[in-house]
Image: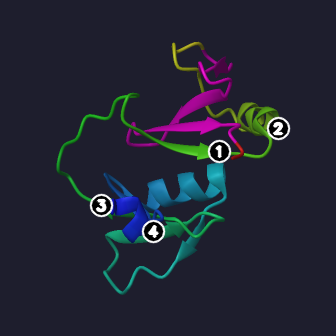
Amino acid sequence: MNTSEKFLFNKDHDAIQVKNVNASTEFYKKVFGLKEIYSAGLGEKFRWLQLNDKVQLHLIESNIGFTPHKGVHMALNVNNLKGFMKFLKSEKIHFENWPGENGTTNTRPDGIQQIYIEDPDGYWIEVNDNRL
């Protein structure tokens, strides 16, 4: 029996280090509409957010260095990529495609359209129209 026959896995959360937990929290709430949830009493250096599917993003304020790059990213899908791009433009939030062209999408080899956004710490977030 292989692992997929024994266990069912679902994503619970991602945790990222940020320089300013309050600025990062506001970014994720404003841009992606994430809802802030209780952070288990961990203190002011921790903020937990939640997506519509209950997957969480844990923000941890720290000065430990990390150099983000586009190849290591979180990916979200959205039900209306064109509408989301219009929202980003209206809010003057920079986004680009994989090659780095400003304000436009590209199509992956599997036919999925995608854009990339950087958060305040330089972490890349892919947003695509893959609606499994």
Q: Which residue is mark 2?
A: 83
Mark sitting earlier along the chain (3/1): 3
- Residue at the extreme bottom of the image, as rendered: 41
Mark 2 is surrounded, within 10 Å at the Cα level, by few (under 14), some (14 to 19) or many (20 or more) other residues, namely few
Q: Which residue is mark 3?
A: 61
Q: Position of residue 3 (x, y in %)?
A: 34, 61
Stretch of the chain drawn in magenta: 102-130
Asked if the residue under mark 2 is in contact with the one under mark 1, i.e. CB atoms within 8 Å, the reply is: no
Q: Secondary structure at mark 2?
A: helix
Quadrant in the rendering for residue 4: bottom left
Q: Position of residue 64 (x, y in %)?
A: 17, 50
Q: CA distance from mark 1 to mark 4?
A: 22 Å
For residue 8, the mark is 4
Q: Position of residue 41 (x, y in %)?
A: 35, 87
Residue type marked 3: Glu
- Of marks 3 and 2, the one in the foreground: 2
Mark sitting earlier along the chain (1/4): 4
Residue type marked 4: Leu
Q: CA distance from mark 1 to mark 2?
A: 13 Å
Q: CA distance from mark 3 to mark 2?
A: 32 Å
**In this view, 106 is above or below 20:** above
Q: Position of residue 82 (x, y in %)?
A: 80, 32
Q: Which residue is mark 1?
A: 77
Q: Is residue 69 left or right of residue 27?
A: left
